[in-house]
Amino acid sequence: MNIENGSLARPLDLDAVQAFVLVADLNSFTRAAEALDTTQSAVSLKLKRLEDRLGRRLLERTPRRVRLSTEGAEFLGAARALLDAHERAVNGHVGTRMSLRIGISDQAAGTDLPTLLAKVGAYDRTLRIEVRIGPSYGLVNAFDRGEVDAAFVCRDGGRTDGERLFVEPYAWYAVPDWEQRADEPLRIASLAAPCTVRAGALKTLDDAGIPWTEVFVGGGLPAVVAAASAGLAVAPLPRRVCPPNIVEVGERLGLPRLPLTEVVLYNRASDVRTREAVRILAAALRAATGG
């Protein structure tokens, strides 16, 4: 029995503990508020009350970032265990297990998919998550057919529905010593067609009158990044997926600026648990991209 000052200790506010875990995972009060479908000030108040209750400072706040204090890092494991125990107590029966079918495009996920899914899994360990990776157009069609509950995709210029999550700049990346021979077309690495980003990138080259040839077609974004890193070609990529050994070369090579890519969410999750899981994934994706 937990005794505090000769009496039963007051239980912790589970909502405040969940807010703390989300702030720790997302490194942001704003993103945690989005995941909880509340305001930043409400999250701040929950965290202040939790710190007062524990008598410890859990987070170090600066104008640009949020990070765990030493005591916060020590408390994080216990906080996760508390939320997990509560989830099992409430939803642990086999009959309450629920499924969430997610579609996410390569460009939307980038190279962050394991981290993104870990954040959702940590939120609800009883939730069964099915993930489909593919081109945006295919995932939107799958959403329209009811095959996935939520789709994180690049916006197709022909559609205006869906919730905009963020807009991301793309640029031309290659190894630093990449040289373009004057008598050869631009060597391109990209995802397989049809792909929204690929189509936009090639159209900018065509509009600028720059000849090109695809020398590498990847089945996933990591493969395209690998081709650029190996010096095989120039690739249209967002900065967040690029390793240190490739750099932006568009200006040096006189290539046209690429159009912005808009990432949107289509969502029909209807119950509380799956809606919250989708919100957490959306907030984690925004946090990962700085969107």
Image: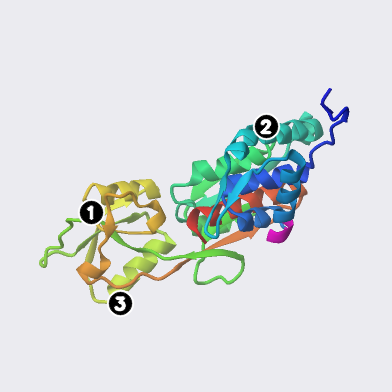
Name the residue carrying label 3.
Answer: 207
Residue 283: name its quadrant. Answer: bottom right
* Quadrant housing the N terminus: top right
Q: Position of residue 196 (x, y in %)?
A: 43, 63
Looking at the image, which residue is at 77% across and 34% down?
Answer: 86
Q: CA distance from mark 2 to mark 3?
A: 57 Å
Q: CA distance from mark 2 to mark 1?
A: 45 Å
Q: Which residues are magenta?
A: 38-42
Residue that extends furthest to the top in the rendered view of this protein: 1
Label 3: state its secondary structure: helix
| Residue nearer the viewer, 49 or 184 | 49
First along the sequence among labels 2 and 3: 2
State whether residue 211 appears in this view.
no
Q: Nearer the viewer, mark 2 or mark 3?
A: 2
Residue type, numbered disc 2: Ala
Q: Position of residue 167 (x, y in %)?
A: 49, 66
Question: Which label number is shown at residue 78?
Answer: 2
First along the sequence among labels 1 and 3: 1
Question: Which label number is shown at residue 175?
Answer: 1
Pointer 2: residues within 10 angstroms few (<14), some, or many (20+)?
A: few
Q: Position of residue 55 (x, y in %)?
A: 72, 40
| Residue nearer the viewer, 252 or 157 | 252
First along the sequence among labels 2 and 1: 2
Q: Position of residue 22 (x, y in %)?
A: 64, 47
Query: Does the magenta run of residues contain 48?
Result: no
| Residue nearer the viewer, 155 or 194 | 155
- Magenta region, mostly helix, strand or loop? helix
State whether residue 130 is above or below residue 4: below
Residue type, numbered disc 3: Asp
